[in-house]
Amino acid sequence: MAAYGLYTHIASNKRRSIVLLVWLFALVYVLVYAGALVAEAMSYQASLDYLMRKAWYDLLAAAPWATIGTVLWVIIAYYFHQSMIDAITGGRDVTRQEEPRLYNLLENLCISRGITMPKLKVMESDALNAFATGMNEKQYAVTVTTGLLNSLDDAEIEAVLGHELTHIRNGDVRMMVVAVIIAGVVGFFAELLFRLWFNTGFGMRRSRSSDDDGGRGKGGNMIALVIAVALIAVAWLLSVMIRFALSRSREFLADAGSVELTKNPDAMISALRKIEGRGELPGATSAVMEMCVDNPREEFSDLFDTHPSVDKRIEALITFAGGHDPGPLALEAPDAGDAPPPDGPWGEPAGEQAGASPAAGTPAGQPFLPPQPPIELGGDRQPDPRAPGKAGPWGRQG
């Protein structure tokens, strides 16, 4: 079905994502079949056809247990994934009193669109990044690094918050969490099978009698092992590719959703330019980086990129939202605590203009003040305006 506007693109993307998730879940059973094939091939000598049929029967018997195990894994992650992410990133909840600037920007965006405000978290890091997490309205949270707060202006921070709110509105966060969980199941079983296989030393137990094979035949064990290894490798590879494809396809829509919320494509573009290459979160897992505004971890192929390139995202914003690209941006250096005092209006340090010297005891960097004011106010003796030689505003008096 063709998509002609932002919301039809969102709906189309959700349908494709559901299909990808179904395939991702199916990979769990591919791994179970591969494990059964390995177990059968390493137990006795038999033909390839016999081993594959036995592995199929084993799959049917193990499928309910595999389903229960995967569902339990999802349930555990459903309730505890935010705690695990906070433990990895060090994110902490903040209130309006602690972060009034950030809190007000997020609250205004939510009020303008009638969105339930997610929890707000701040992560102590010099990296420039942000991400959203959660499975439902009670769990949704937006985490922002302190580096992002210090480097972006209000309009740019608002654009980043709009990007993350769009992920929440479109169901991307929930979809990505489920995808990461299922991909984790696939990766766990793949690693488990390889470890079991390597720990057995690639050995196979032969049947007691080589003359009586019970109709099983012979010669298919090595081929079955090769097929099983290929299935495990392909399942793991596909799980990674599907997970990354889900992430890539949603970043364009999140950028567009941010512009739709803020009506400011230039702010989204300049935010991307500032974040570009500066979003690495030390100690964060690849699953966390996939949920961030930008993932600077480069892969060797587009198939393994979790995000479109910043240039492609900006190109889309220019083409469809009419934004303007300022090009790569350099961040301003932080203020130094021991910086010299600002120069005076004639390019000389304050307090040294026209040969003036600071008064004794004047702190360094403070403007020079004379020891006495040039005009005495409120004194007991008032000057006599008729005194000879006293100049008034229009010349000498009488």
Image: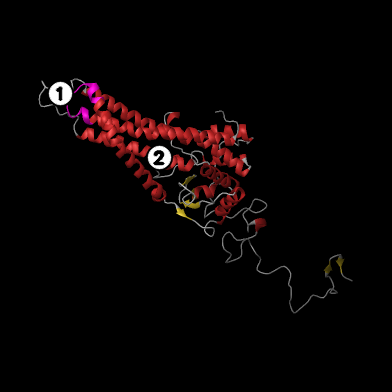
Query: At 68% from the left edge and 69% from the top edge, which residue is drawn?
Result: 372
- The quadrant of the rendering that contains the C terminus is bottom right
Query: At 56% from the left edge and 28% from the top edge, which residue is drawn?
Result: 2
Determine the image quadrant of residue 227.
top left
* Nearer-N-terminus badge (2/1): 2
Q: Nearer the viewer, mark 2 or mark 1?
A: 1
Residue 84: in sight, yes or no?
A: no
Q: State the mark number for residue 214.
A: 1
348 or 299: nearer the viewer: 299
| Residue 248 image position (x, y, % from top left) | 48, 34
Q: How many marks on residues?
A: 2
Q: What amino acid is at disc 2?
A: Val
| Residue 16 image position (x, y, % from top left) | 48, 32
The region drawn magenta spans 39-52
Determine the image quadrant of residue 394.
bottom right
Q: State the mark number for residue 387.
A: none
Rendered position, 220 above or below 386: above
Residue 41 belongs to magenta span: yes
Give the structural element (helix, strand or loop) at label 1.
loop
121 or 355: nearer the viewer: 121
| Residue 213 image position (x, y, % from top left) | 14, 23
Residue on which disc 2 sits:
180
| Residue 137 image position (x, y, % from top left) | 49, 50
Residue 175 belongs to magenta span: no
